Amino acid sequence: MHQPAEFRDVKRRGKKFADAFFSLSVLANHETYPRLGLSIATRTFGTAVARNRIKRLARESFRLNQYALPPVDVTVSAREAARSAKPADLRASLDAHWKSILKQC
């Protein structure tokens, strides 16, 4: 997803999935593949280093799971608790979200 309108549409109309670390919105798309959009707030993470760490982790998790996902647009927003979480906990959280998307979409 590249356009702000696409992000807004997914956030507004999409199905919500959330836990302590991440909030995801999922909406079916008209493509043949899933697409990922990241929304990592500066006020939540502060430094670019912290934001980029979360973005890399989310992209890698999506890359490993994208072929199992249906054609949907997914926006991932990180929550405050993700700042101090261990990378393994964040990966486990995202893996659980991908499984939830498979079951419910």
Image: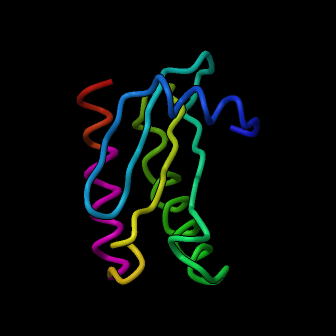
Residue found 61% across the figure and 32% down from its top: 8
Is residue 37 positioned above or below 105 on the image?
below
Residue 44, horizontal then vertical, whole percent: 50, 71
Tell me: 65 left or right of 17: right
Residue 65, horizontal then vertical, whole percent: 43, 48
Is residue 80 positioned above or below 12 on the image?
below
Query: Magenta residues?
Result: 86-98
- Residue sitting at the far front: 43
Residue found 37% across the figure and 57% down from its top: 22
Residue found 57% across the figure and 66% down from its top: 55
Based on the picture, tell me whether residue 1 belongs to the magenta stretch: no
Secondary structure mostly seen in the magenta stretch: helix
Is residue 22 positioned above or below 90 on the image?
above
Residue 12, horizontal then vertical, whole percent: 50, 28
Is residue 93 positioned above or below 6 on the image?
below
Q: Quadrant of residue 89?
A: bottom left
Residue 58, horizontal then vertical, whole percent: 49, 61
Looking at the rendering, in which quadrant would you find the C terminus? top left
The color scheme shown is rainbow
Tell me: 30 left or right of 82: right
Based on the picture, tell me whether residue 95 belongs to the magenta stretch: yes
Looking at the rendering, in which quadrant would you find the N terminus? top right
- Residue sitting at the far right: 3
Q: Quadrant of residue 52?
A: bottom right
Q: Quadrant of residue 39?
A: bottom right
Residue found 57% across the figure and 29% down from its top: 33
Q: How many marks?
A: 0
Tell me: 77 left or right of 39: left
